[in-house]
C-alpha cells in the first residue's frame, strides 16, 4: 500500500516549525497500537505546534482544515478554528488598528477554495465568506458522515453564536435540520440544536405546525412530542392562541385514544393538564368519557394510561388554596376508585396498583 504524505505545498508554509513527532506508543505486548497514516501524523504534528503557540494565522487555518479532512472528531482542531474566527473578527474591528493584510490573503484563499450559499450577516465581506465556508462545510459533514458527532453540532452552534443568528438564517437552519430528520427523526443532537435555534431567534410561534406534521407522519416520535411540549410551555407568557390550544388538544386526544399503548401521548396530555386545565377542562372531561366508553367495550389498554389523567383531572377540579375536608375526602375516594379499576383492567401490574392503593389510604 502506497503511503500518502502531507501535501508538499502546504508543508512548505511551515519551514520555520519543527513538527511534533507523533509516533505510535509501543505497548508492552504490542497488540492494540493505532496505525496512524503518515499524512495524519505529519499534519497533526504541525497543527499541534501551531495550536500550542496560539498562532492564529492563515497557515494555521489551512492546516486545521487539512486535519479535519483526516479526522472530523478531533475537538482540539474544531476549537482552534473557532478561536481563529474570533481572532479574525477582532482584527477587523477599526479600534484595534491592526494590519489587514492577513484578511486580504485570506480572501484570495477563499476565492479559490470555497463555494457559497448566501446568508445574511453584517460582517466584513471577507470574514462573511470565511464563516459561510465554515457553515457550509459543517452542513456537508453532517449530511454525509457526521450526523451523530456531537462536536460538529456544537461547532455549528458556536459559529452562529460568533456571528449572530437572525430570524432569516434561523429558518434556513431549521430547513437544514429537517433534512437530517428525514434520515433520522430521533437524532438527539439535531433536536438539541433545534431548541437552541428557536430560543436564539424567538420563533416559537411558527413551530407548532411543523411538529404536528412530524407527529402526523409518525405518532410514536417521542422526540417530537417532547419538543412540542417545550415549544408550548417554554415561555412564561401565554402566546398560544385559543384556536391553537384547541387544535393541539383535539389532535393529541384523538391519537391517545387510537394508540393507547403510546405512553408519550398520555404523558404529554398530563403535562398540559397542569397548565391549562382551568380554561380547557371540557376537553379533558370529554377525553375521560370517551376513554371510559372504550374500556367498557373491552379496550383495557387505555385503563392504566387514563388513570393518571383522571386523577390529575380530579385533583385540579377539587384543588383550592385551603381545600375543605369534604373536597379532600372526595379526591381520595376518586383516587381509590380509579386504582381499583386499574387493578381489574391491568392484572399484570396488580402489585404496582395495590402499592398505589395502599399509599392512598
Image: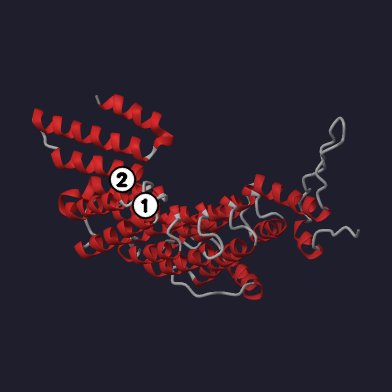
User: In the picture, which quadrant includes the C terminus?
Assistant: top left
Answer whether residue 322 is visible to the viewer in this image. Answer: no
Q: Position of residue 320 (x, y in %)?
A: 11, 37
In the foreground, 315 or 36: 315
Residue 154: x %, y % from top left: 52, 52
Report x, y in % for residue 271.
30, 46
Q: Horizontally, is 172 left or right of 80 in the view?
A: left
Would you call the spot at circle 1 few (<14 residues within 10 Å), some (14-19), or many (20 or more)?
many
* Location of mark 1 (residue): 265
Q: Residue at x 27, y 52 (%)?
A: 293
Is disc 2 placed on a helix, strand or loop? helix
Q: Is residue 313 visible?
A: yes
Q: Depth-wise, is mark 1 or mark 2 nearer the camera? A: 2
Q: 154 or 185: nearer the eye?
A: 185
Residue under the point 33% across and 66% down:
206
* Image vertical order of residue 102 relative to residue 153, above or below: below
- Could you classify mark 2 by the number of other residues whose Cα lies within 10 Å: few (under 14), some (14-19), or many (20 or more)? many
Residue that lies at the very extreme toward the front in this rendered image: 297
Q: How many angstroms separate mark 1 from mark 2 (CA)?
A: 11 Å
Where does the N terminus fall, quadrant-wise? bottom right
Quarter of the image for residue 152 reads: bottom right
96 or 2: which is nearer to us? 2
Residue 32 image point, x, y percent: 82, 39
Query: For mark 2, what is the residue?
Result: 306
Q: Is residue 198 left or right of residue 156?
A: left
Say which quarter of the image contains residue 330.
top left
Nearest the eye: 146 or 138: 146
Amino acid at each position: 500500500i502506497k503511503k500518502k504524505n502531507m501535501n508538499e505545498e502546504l508543508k512548505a508554509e511551515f519551514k520555520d516549525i519543527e513538527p511534533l513527532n507523533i509516533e505510535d506508543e509501543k505497548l508492552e505486548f504490542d497488540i492494540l497500537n493505532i496505525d496512524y497514516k503518515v499524512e495524519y501524523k505529519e499534519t497533526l504534528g504541525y497543527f499541534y505546534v501551531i495550536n500550542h503557540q496560539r498562532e492564529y494565522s492563515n497557515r494555521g487555518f489551512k492546516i486545521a482544515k487539512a486535519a479535519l479532512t483526516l479526522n472530523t472528531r478531533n475537538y482540539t482542531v474544531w476549537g482552534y478554528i473557532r478561536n481563529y474566527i474570533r481572532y479574525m473578527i477582532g482584527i477587523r474591528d477599526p479600534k484595534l488598528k491592526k494590519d489587514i493584510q492577513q484578511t486580504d490573503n485570506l480572501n484570495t484563499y477563499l476565492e479559490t477554495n470555497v463555494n457559497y450559499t448566501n446568508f445574511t450577516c453584517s460582517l466584513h465581506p471577507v470574514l462573511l465568506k470565511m464563516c459561510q465556508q465554515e457553515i457550509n462545510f459543517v452542513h456537508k459533514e453532517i449530511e454525509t458522515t457526521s450526523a451523530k458527532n456531537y462536536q460538529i453540532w456544537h461547532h455549528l452552534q458556536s459559529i452562529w453564536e460568533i456571528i449572530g443568528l437572525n430570524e432569516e438564517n434561523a429558518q434556513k437552519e431549521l430547513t437544514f435540520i429537517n433534512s437530517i430528520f428525514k434520515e433520522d427523526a430521533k437524532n438527539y443532537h439535531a433536536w438539541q440544536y433545534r431548541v437552541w435555534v428557536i430560543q436564539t431567534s424567538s420563533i416559537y410561534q411558527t413551530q407548532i405546525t411543523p411538529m404536528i406534521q412530524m407527529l402526523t407522519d409518525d405518532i410514536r416520535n417521542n422526540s417530537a412530542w417532547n419538543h412540542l411540549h417545550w415549544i408550548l410551555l417554554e415561555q412564561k407568557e401565554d402566546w398560544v392562541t385559543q384556536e391553537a390550544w384547541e387544535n393541539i388538544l383535539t389532535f393529541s386526544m384523538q391519537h391517545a385514544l387510537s394508540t393507547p399503548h403510546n405512553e408519550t401521548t398520555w404523558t404529554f396530555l398530563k403535562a398540559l393538564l397542569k397548565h391549562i386545565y382551568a380554561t380547557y377542562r371540557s376537553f379533558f372531561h370529554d377525553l375521560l368519557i370517551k376513554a371510559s366508553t372504550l374500556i367498557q367495550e373491552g379496550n383495557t389498554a387505555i385503563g392504566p394510561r387514563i388513570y393518571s389523567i383522571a386523577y390529575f383531572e380530579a385533583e385540579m377540579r377539587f384543588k383550592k388554596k385551603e381545600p375543605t375536608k369534604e373536597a379532600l375526602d372526595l379526591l381520595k375516594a376518586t383516587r381509590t376508585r380509579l386504582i381499583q379499576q386499574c387493578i381489574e383492567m391491568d392484572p399484570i401490574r396488580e402489585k404496582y396498583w395495590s402499592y398505589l392503593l395502599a399509599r392512598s389510604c
